[in-house]
Amino acid sequence: MLERLVIVAIVAAAVLAVTVIVRLLARRRIASAAGRPLPAALLSRLPGSDPAIIYFYGPHCGTCRQQAGVLDQIAADGGIPVVRVDATSEPAIADALAVLTVPTTVIVDGRRQVRAINPGFRSDRALAAQLRAL
């Protein structure tokens, strides 16, 4: 009985360690992409020179539909351009910006530099705060 508990504890510790390592590597990859210029394939899609949001989604992602609604509201209220990129059909662009999951929003300043990469759903308040910080 005690041996089984020890084995379960060792397996749980190993799973926890792997999870922590994967998260740290993902954060490091995302941090390395911030501050980079945008890939050329995206530059032509961005209108003007105002801050913008690049939105990576997947066609069968339920959370992506929720994020799209938030982005539609930001675009309507603040006039912020939102460029939508299907991460499944344009994986090279997603990889260039360290997109590891969908939805992901990328905040871009007026000089077309990446300022923030947000994996997962982000609220309108969180995105608005990032845009105000530019």
Image (cartoon, rainbow, N blue to C red):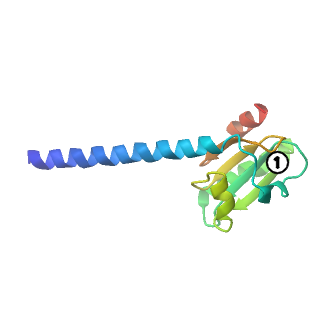
Q: Residue furthest top?
A: 133
Left or right, 27 with reference to 59? left
Where is residue 44? Give x, y as percent.
85, 57
Residue holding disc 1: 75
Can residue 123 be seen? no
Q: Position of residue 18 (x, y in %)?
A: 37, 47
Q: Residue furthest bottom?
A: 89
Give the quadrant of the C terminus.
top right
Is 5 on the left-hand or right-hand side of 115?
left
Closest to the observer: 21 or 69? 21
- Mark 1 surroundings: few (<14), some (14-19) or many (≥20) residues within 10 A: some
> x, y (%) of residue 16?
35, 44
Q: Is residue 14 left or right of residue 105?
A: left
Question: Quadrant location of residue 83?
Answer: bottom right
Q: Residue at x 75, y 58 (%)?
A: 84
Q: Residue at x 84, y 48 (%)?
A: 76
- The quarter holding residue 21 reads top left
In the figure, is residue 87 to the left or right of 133?
left
Amino acid bearing label 1: Ala
Examine the rendering and report whether any part of residue 45 can be seen: yes
Q: Secondary structure at mark 1?
A: helix
Image coordinates for residue 105, horizontal then vertical, percent:
68, 49
Tell me the residue at 68%/65% (across/down): 90
Residue beneath the point at 8% across and 48% down: 1
